[in-house]
Image (cartoon, coloured by chain):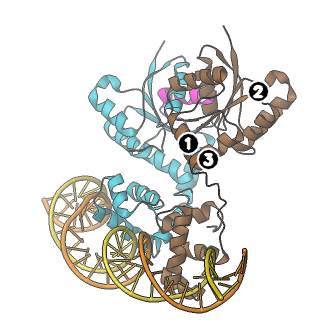
Chain colours: A brown, B cyan, C yellow, D orange
Amino acid sequence: MINYTVVVVDDHNLLSQAIAGMVNGFSKFKVLYTCANGQELVDKFTKSPEFIPDVVLMDINMPILNGIETTEWITKNHETVNVMALSVEDEDLTILKMLKAGAVSYLLKDTKKEILEKALVEIVENGFYHTQNVTNLLMKSVSGNKTKEIVFKDRELTFMQYACSELTYKEIADKMCLSPKTIDGYRDVLFTKLNVKNRVGLVMYAIKNKIYTP
Amino acid sequence: MINYTVVVVDDHNLLSQAIAGMVNGFSKFKVLYTCANGQELVDKFTKSPEFIPDVVLMDINMPILNGIETTEWITKNHETVNVMALSVEDEDLTILKMLKAGAVSYLLKDTKKEILEKALVEIVENGFYHTQNVTNLLMKSVSGNKTKEIVFKDRELTFMQYACSELTYKEIADKMCLSPKTIDGYRDVLFTKLNVKNRVGLVMYAIKNKIYTP
DNA sequence: AATGTTTAGGGGAAAAACACCCTTTTTTTT
DNA sequence: AAAAAAAAGGGTGTTTTTCCCCTAAACATT
């Protein structure tokens, strides 16, 4: 009977313990220890080879050293360790980042227990496990691989900042000394470029990308 | 040996199962079943008295019927059931709302296993368990409560969160199962209440006041 | 000199958003 | 039980936003 070792990394103590308990219930798997953030894991790994497991179950949103950075470190320094991302985030971009960082699986936290076990088995036996969702995402990102860094012109940036205020487009046009129709044009271009549907989408993009700080 | 029954409500399947497993490990406690949202719980409760536990471990952010609404329903219809909130949210406002709705305890998800067990025991024996944090919060809210702060109804908060997405008002109405006209009303009321001119103003308010986190 | 590419802006229509004022029903308070 | 407030939504009209397609300079490139 083969035993694989697992480490759980999650900043929510209760959850890491609960998941650890669940994993310990799987035959073949045993949890070595849990960490509250990436830095703790790095410390453990560098302290002794005994602390290096077969699989790391990794949350993404964590203080100090987050899941993506930690995964990058692991794949760089400990190639044999399989990282499985376990997150609530269902954002394409996040998933891709995590996979790019070297994660061999990405499960959402609303997964069923049985799936987790199956995924763990697949990982130690085949080296990876991907849900249909993730597979689709990978397909999509390979075919339409527009990792094109979006570049903004000065005017577009200025406009975006105004768009985050309560000004109407006409008022923005005044502020920028341009015709309302020109502003119309900037807006249309940005909507397409950023793949958003309306002004709220634009605002959210600006905030997430620190073009505008609330 | 006394056995108390527990129900876990959380929309993240893996977590509810993991926590259920942990609770089953506590002597004295047994998990009856888990639910993915408040509505499921209400359905269970109304179906048979056998489904009514001693304690409900309740997440707050859930689809369909959220933790606060569900807790209100429970305290109204099943006085004997103790609701313990189990959330990642550490916002004073949320905690107070949950307590006001009738929760007898509020634990963060980064609590230690031992604390959870202790809290459960306290609850079934004394009827409540409050951490120091929650106690302080209660003190504060009793004494210095005069910030003329704007108070939102649950529906308004839900609406505000949707308003931060790219959904049109009509689509929001669908999601909330309300007439577009009602949504119209919420919007008008909020615009006045928050003294904003348009949806962008509303979005900014929601972000600044952590009603919505980008 | 011919071609391409930003940059600025126009026209028009359809869809949303916004404002305001009003009714009915239910719930809460007094 | 009466009054007040909250919750849901109807009507109508105006303004803004959104979408799509179209010019014409101003540069830039080969």
Which span of residues is magenta-colored?
B112-130
Q: In this view, does C1 lie to the left or right of B148?
A: right
Q: Is residue A41 left or right of residue B211?
A: right
Identified at 66% across, 26% down, the residue is: A127
The kind of residue on which mark 1 rests is Met
Quarter that holds the C terminus of chain A? bottom right
Mark 3–mark 1 CB contact (< 8 Å): no
Query: Of helix, strand and loop, which one carries label 3?
Result: helix
The kind of residue on which mark 2 rests is Thr
Identified at 63% across, 68% down, the residue is: A212
Q: How far, Cα to Cα, is label 3 from label 2?
A: 23 Å
Write down the chain letter for disc 1: A
**Label 1 neighbour load within 10 Å: few <14, some 14-19, many 20+:** few
In which quadrant of the rendered view does residue A19 lie?
top right
- Of label 2 and label 1, which has the lower sequence position? 2
In which quadrant of the rendered view does residue A193 lie?
bottom right
Residue B151 in percent (x, y) is at 45, 61
Write down the chain letter for disc 3: A
Q: Who is closer to the viewer here, A113 or A83?
A: A83
Disc nearest the viewer among 3 and 2: 2
Check residue A94 in the rendering and tell me which mark sits there, or answer none. Answer: 3
Q: How far, Cα to Cα, is label 3 from label 1?
A: 16 Å
Q: In this view, does A77 lie to the left or right of B17?
A: right
Q: How far, Cα to Cα, is label 2 from label 1?
A: 26 Å
Q: Is residue B114 magenta?
A: yes
Count of numbered circles in the view: 3
Residue behind mark 1 = A139
What is the magenta segment's predominant secondary structure? Answer: helix
